[in-house]
Amino acid sequence: MNPFEKSLLYSPLEGGAGYRPMKILLVQTSFLGDTILSTPVIAGIKAVYPGSELWMMTTPLSAHLVMRDPLLASVIAYDKRNRESGLAGLLNMARKLKKMKFDRVYSLHRSFRTSLLLWLSRIPVRIGCSDAKLSSLYHETRSRDFSEHDVLRNLSILKGEPGLPSVDPEMRLFAPSDHEIDPAVQRCVADSGPYAVIAPGSAWPTKMWFSEGYRAVAIFLQQYGYRVVLVGADSDKPACRIVAQDLDVINFAGKSNISEAMYLVSHAALVVCNDSMTLHMASAFKIPNVAIFCATSPKFGYGPWKNRAIVVEKQGLYCKPCRPHGSQKCPEGTDACMKELPPEEVIRAIQKLVPQNNP
């Protein structure tokens, strides 16, 4: 092995006593969906540095999405909004990273806090995005093409790496095994007949199609021969309650964790959801997906990826899309993108994607 090849695999031990595998950190501490969209970079780093020990730092919730990836040595959960918030939390995490002696870090997160954190950690080679805040604190920055899907934008963090092979831009999610899952969730999957997952929630209110529309879709799906399973966080309970009222559906909103949501999506025949984490789960598991875009648009690069999917959205609105990530309320005060898309359009998309189930 020549010195260049060795540099891609190993780092020298202190005192010149030999070599150890290179230790690399990948950072993505944004929203849950952003973490899923970042997972192709895991395979990309391992393709460039095949003998490396690769870690990922993300949020405590997102850790559930990546902790089963066999290419990761481990996951660091950075609770930046609660237990490790503020300057004290940042300094504490910087000390922790410094002690772990990483050789390189690739940061997909572009905030002031992340740039400062990694600078304080003194990792010898720090690589970030050219549009990151405080980008001058990185040794190298990589530009992104905003006309591309976010999967490809994330992979551009590896642009220019020596010996970079062609990387298959597949999202990586690994569903939990049966023994990790609540028996009620297991029974839902094991029961006879295919089911459709409906996820009517979102972290952003302007991304949420109106609940009565999802209710009409749930009624149709039952008539079409599919069981209906609702998923969501505690904050999605009101929307799911409207969808489920007086219907024979299975409502896991606020009753299942992210690992169980992965399990449910991975076994589903269809997913109907907003522009949200569930959309990216469906893409990762190659599940047919009807994706409803309200205030946002797939042209920003966050649409379905490499699965059978149809995007449905209200056309002809001068104000849509209003911003890439949605907002807390409609800037125009009309909620038109959320309320004026008729259920019939979503139903037609379902009929194109999956056949009627006639037991």
Image (cartoon, rainbow, N blue to C red):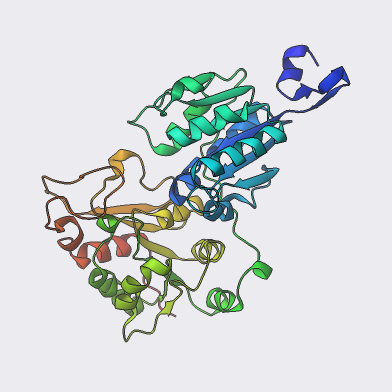
Q: Position of residue 179 (x, y in %)?
A: 68, 69
Which quadrant of the rendered structure holds the C terminus?
bottom left
Give above or below for 262 relative to 48: below
Q: Nearer the viewer, residue 252 or 309?
A: 252
- Inspect this view and state whether residue 355 appears: no
Occupied quadrant, residue 355 = bottom left
**Residue at the spot 13% in from the left edge and 46% down from the top edge:** 319
**Residue at the spot 77% in from the left edge and 12% down from the top edge:** 3
Residue situated furthest top in the rendering: 3
**Residue at the spot 26% in from the left edge and 47% down from the top edge:** 296
Q: Position of residue 66 (x, y in %)?
A: 59, 50
Q: Position of residue 358 (x, y in %)?
A: 40, 78
Q: Nearer the viewer, residue 86 or 51?
A: 86
Classify residue 332 as left or right of residue 9.
Answer: left
Q: Position of residue 286 (x, y in %)?
A: 48, 53
Give above or below for 138 relative to 211: above
Classify residue 182 as left or right of residue 133.
Answer: right
Residue situated furthest bottom in the rendering: 246
Which quadrant of the rendered structure holds the N terminus?
top right
Occupied quadrant, residue 246 = bottom left
Residue situated furthest right in the rendering: 17
Count of picture labels = 0
**Residue at the spot 65% in from the left edge and 69% down from the top edge:** 178
Classify residue 88 as left or right of residue 301.
Answer: right
- Inspect this view and state whether residue 225 appears: yes
